[in-house]
Amino acid sequence: MHAFGKYLSWIYAFTAVVCIRFAFGTFKALNSAGQVHLSRYAAPFACMLALFACVFTTAWWTVFKSKSSARMWCLVASSQYLFVALIPCLVTHRLHSINSTLSAIAVMGCVAFGKRQKVKLAANIDQVRSIPGDFTNRYVNRFAMGVTFGLSLGSYLWWQGWLRTVHISGLDSLLVRSVVTLVVLLAITSIHETGHAIVGKICGMKVRAFFIGPFQWCIRDAKWGFEFKPKSLFFADGITALIPGEGELRPGQYLSMMAAGSLVNVLSGCLALYFAFHSGIALSPPILGVIALFGAWSLGVAAANLLPFRTPQGYSDGAIVLQLLAGGAFAAYHLSVARIGSSLVSALRPRDYDIGSIRAAARGIANGRQALLMWLYAFSHSIDAGKTKEADDVLANAELVCLQSAGKIPAELHTSFIFGNAFIRRDPVATRFWWNRMQATNPTRFNADYWRAESALHWIEGNLEEANHAWEKSYALVKQLPQAGAYDFSRDCCTLLKRELDLASVA
């Protein structure tokens, strides 16, 4: 519920703004001349809205700051949604009159913040370490979150006013507007990621992953797979992973691909607003209303994505564009990752990596997952090149970065530490240490690397029967992989380990 609670907190913030708006409008009407006919309940109603706004604001703020009191405030905020949802039922005495949308938000809030031991509050942006040269810091990260929310809220309020001005009905229901909002966000994300993909294809790159909210296509172990993740439905996040087909990638190509997403959002947003405002377009008023919201939010999303900020999941497009323009360690990192990715579809092997760029990026970034990836790539390079002493030194650097990292390291990255400590160092204690760390991350992908790591662990600890059993699982998977540099390297690693297993059996 880590990310889910964060997104709910922004719904609380939006609701607070709506409550303040209506409370202010009611108080203004009460103080206006000729409004004495207003119900005596108007003033208490306005006060209640103001109180609700205070609770929603406090709930958002405590989640944003990761306060210990956030759980309590969010549960109170959820109860307010439930109270408002039940008002029509209490007045009409009809069960079907309950507001289903507000009830759903109340239930989601109770689920997200109900169990103390399982709740993780929204990501504390201060825990995302700033790295010199990445053009972000915690203040910019916070500012970017506020700007993103402000642009989204401003666009939505403008849209509501525009609907009233042009007398468009059919979108008045809260449920209808919620569905429209979700569909529009998914459409904007789809167009943004498609922009990245199209320009990448023009530059000779190949798509490896394409995520649109809960719809996630990804190549794993050389096979396309699809997953539907309902918990990502309300996030509307997107990811497009591309790699150069033959390992050649100019900085300008990568820069164009990264800027394409926001550029497409700007173009599609302007086109949508033109259709919405152009009276000669023969579309129904509700459709024009949806198009107008799409246009306004497209421009807001484009502006927000061009801000240089960092989240626990990675960098914004704007931050990456600045890093590429500035050159240096981060430009080397992005280009190295892209070029190394081509080993999945070409004959490029780890021993062919541009080790100079990889080491420069690793030393320049110094900490975090980016530096860890660079050292692990350098480790693969050393193994493939047969440089055992160099592999030992590189592995030590990778271990240091991993142990100092504040974020959670994926289970897949631990397999290199397990194999390296067993095969290079012949150290059973260190091998077991890294195995236990990997198991603590609850691995879910039992691929060839996982079984090879387990085989190496059992071998170095003298359990040859278990080692051979795990090796057979690893080899059965790795031999199914197509001919490509990265997969050839995996097969060679299995061969090296099998040689040690056979020697141990003879001894």
Image (cartoon, helix red, strand yellow):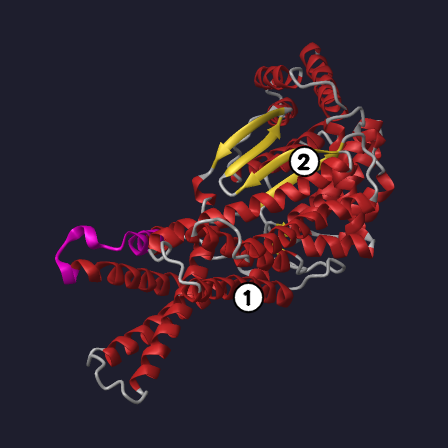
- Is 91 colored magenta in this rendering? yes
Q: Which residue is found at the position 72% from the left and 14% from the top?
A: 503
The mark that comes first in sequence, 1 or 2, is 1
Q: Comparing marks 1 and 2, which lies closer to the viewer?
A: 1
Residue 144 lies left or right of residue 70; in this view the side is right
- Residue 270 position, x and y percent, is 61, 56
What amino acid is labelled 1 in the image?
Gly
Residue 453 vs residue 329, the one in the foreground = 329
Other residues around mark 1 within 10 Å, as few (<14) / some (14–19) / many (≥20) = some
- Region rendered in magenta: 90-108
In the rendered image, which quarter contains the C terminus? Answer: top right
Q: Which mark is residue 93?
A: none
Tell me which corner region of the image, top left, top right, bottom left or bottom right, holds residue 464.
top right
Q: CA distance from mark 1 to mark 2?
A: 40 Å
Direction top: furthest residue:
506
Q: Which residue is found at the position 55% from the left and 53% from the top?
A: 275
Q: Which residue is found at the position 63% from the left and 60% from the top?
A: 303
Report the predominant secondary structure element of the magenta stretch. Answer: helix
Tell me which corner region of the image, top left, top right, bottom left or bottom right, holds residue 438.
top right
Direction bottom: furthest residue:
33
- Residue 466 position, x and y percent, is 57, 18
Residue 121 lies left or right of residue 361; in this view the side is left
Check disc 1 and report the residue beneath it. Answer: 146
Q: Which mark is residue 417?
A: 2
- Residue 101 position, x and y percent, is 32, 53
Say which element carries label 1: helix
Residue 387 lies left or right of residue 53; in this view the side is right
